[in-house]
Structure formats: structure tokens, C-alpha cells
């Protein structure tokens, strides 16, 4: 069910098929291992994010660039 959320696209870049499940807030950063912390992600974004939170400045910059590229902004 998680992989079909967001029309089956990566929640971070929105341009690739989601083939992995990522913890939005990593377990290492006291994130919960519960369904509302799971998001669909492509392999590239999941690999890049690793143990980072999706709220870090580096992640926000990386993912905003990916989204801008997708929309041609």
C-alpha cells in the first residue's frame, strides 16, 4: 500500500517510480517504525537520503532541486 501512494511515484523527487519504502524520519533519529513514517521512494532518493531526515537543509535543497527539474522551473 505504501508503494502505491502518491500515484506510485517517489515522494521526494516525484519523477521516478517508487520501488522502496523509506522512513521519512529515520529510526536512527528517533523516528518511529510505524505506517505514518513510511513513504514511497525511488532507489536514488532513498540511497541519497540514507539516515538523514527529510527536514534537513541538505535534503530540502536536494529535493527542491529535483522537484524544480521535474516541473521545468
Image (cartoon, rainbow, N blue to C red):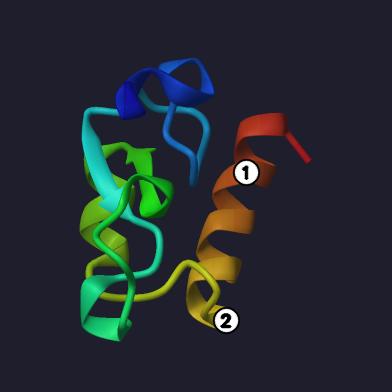
Q: Which of the two residues, 60 or 2, is positioned nearer the viewer here?
A: 2
Quarter of the image for the N terminus: give it.
top left
Callouts 1 and 2 close, C-beta under 8 Å: no
The kind of secondary structure element at disc 1 is: helix
Q: Which of the two residues, 9 or 73, is positioned nearer the viewer here?
A: 9
Q: Is residue 9 above or below residue 34?
A: above
Q: Which of the two residues, 25 or 11, is positioned nearer the viewer here?
A: 25
Q: Residue at the spot x=28%, y=50% of the render?
A: 22
* Residue at image mark 1: 67
Residue 67 location (% of width, % of height): 62, 43
Q: Which of the two residues, 14 or 4, is positioned nearer the viewer here?
A: 4
Residue 70 location (% of width, % of height): 61, 33
The kind of secondary structure element at disc 2 is: helix
Residue 42's quadrant in the figure?
top left
**N-terminal of the two: label 1 or label 2?**
2
Q: Could you classify mark 1 by the number of other residues whose Cα lies within 10 Å: few (under 14), some (14-19), or many (20 or more)?
A: some
Q: Residue at the spot x=31%, y=67% of the render?
A: 32
Q: Is residue 6 left or right of residue 32?
A: right
Q: Is residue 16 left or right of residue 63?
A: left
Q: Residue at the spot x=21%, y=56% of the render?
A: 47
- Name the disc covering residue 18, or none: none
Q: Is residue 30 above or below residue 5?
A: below
Residue 2's quadrant in the figure?
top left
* Residue at image mark 2: 57
Q: Is residue 56 above or below residue 21?
A: below
Amino acid at each position: 500500500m505504501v508503494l502505491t501512494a502518491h500515484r506510485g511515484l517517489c515522494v521526494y523527487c516525484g519523477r521516478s517510480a517508487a520501488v522502496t519504502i523509506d522512513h521519512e524520519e529515520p529510526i536512527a533519529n528517533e523516528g518511529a517504525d510505524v505506517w505514518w513514517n513510511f513513504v514511497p521512494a525511488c532507489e536514488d532518493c532513498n540511497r541519497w537520503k540514507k539516515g538523514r531526515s527529510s527536514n534537513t537543509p541538505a535534503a530540502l535543497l536536494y529535493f527542491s532541486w529535483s522537484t524544480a527539474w521535474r516541473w521545468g522551473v
